[in-house]
Amino acid sequence: MSTDDTRQAYIDGLHQIADFLAEHPEVPLPHLHSSVGGKWGPVLRIFLLSVNEPREALATVARAMGNATKAADITGDGFEVYREFAGIKLVAHASRSEVCERVVTGTREVTREIPDPEALAAVPKVSVTEVVEDVEWVCAPLLKAAPKGLISL
């Protein structure tokens, strides 16, 4: 794609987002960023980190978006829903711990080597066995009352 094509796609995306925001005053204004879903490109972010009910706020944005995609953010600490508008993505972002349920799916013992506390100067290694949680984040109930297919993974 040429520079002119990329610029026009960006401008077209901004027009579409402007129309969307005009039609949905319940959606906060976005913040410009450069990545979503592990892919770099033009992105406008709506951060829902300081709202009273981030889960409800994220659900409101997702409903307004219609056909949104959901994903953990690049760090794994956030949860996002996004929709692409002609080459620019509009992303609503919340803390994953506030919108998803952390479910322990099992435990396992993991052995690792650590410095021996009694001989730290020589830095020998000893094996230590510990219990480590296996977890899964269940985020599907976000739009439990929404029509099927509203958010796709």
Image (cartoon, helix red, strand yellow):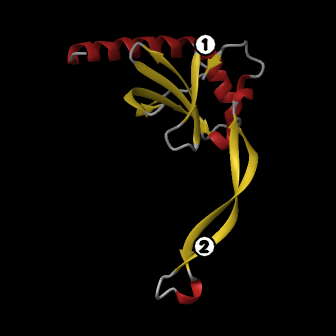
Closer-to-camera residue (39/86)? 39
Residue pictured at 45% horizontal, 14% vertical: 85
Q: Is residue 135 above or below residue 116?
A: above
Closer-to-camera residue (44/119)? 119
Three-letter residue code for mark 1: Gly
- Is disc 1 placed on a helix, strand or loop? loop
Residue pictured at 21% horizontal, 16% vertical: 2
Q: Earlier in the sequence, mark 2 or mark 1?
A: 1
Q: Is residue 115 above or below residue 132?
A: below
Residue pictured at 49% horizontal, 28% vertical: 30
Q: Is residue 42 above or below residue 111?
A: above
Which residue in the structure is indicated by mark 1?
66
Closer-to-camera residue (35/47)? 35
Label 1: few (<14), some (14–19) or many (≥20) C-alpha neighbours in 10 Å: few
The image quadrant of residue 77 is top right
Q: Position of residue 59 (x, y in %)?
A: 67, 25
The image quadrant of residue 48 is top right
- Is disc 2 placed on a helix, strand or loop? strand
Q: Are marks 2 and 1 in contact (CB under 8 Å)?
A: no
Which residue in the structure is indicated by mark 2?
127
Query: Relative to 61, is 87 on the left or the right?
Result: left
Q: Which quadrant of the rendered structure holds the N terminus?
A: top left
Q: Position of residue 100 (x, y in %)?
A: 70, 37
Query: Relative to 145, is 69 on the left or the right?
Result: left
Q: Position of residue 75 (x, y in %)?
A: 51, 44
Three-letter residue code for mark 2: Ser
Query: Relative to 116, is 145 on the left or the right?
Result: right
Q: Is residue 125 above or below residue 68?
A: below
Q: Which quadrant of the rendered structure holds the C terminus?
A: top right
Spatial CA distance of label 2 from label 1 is: 52 Å
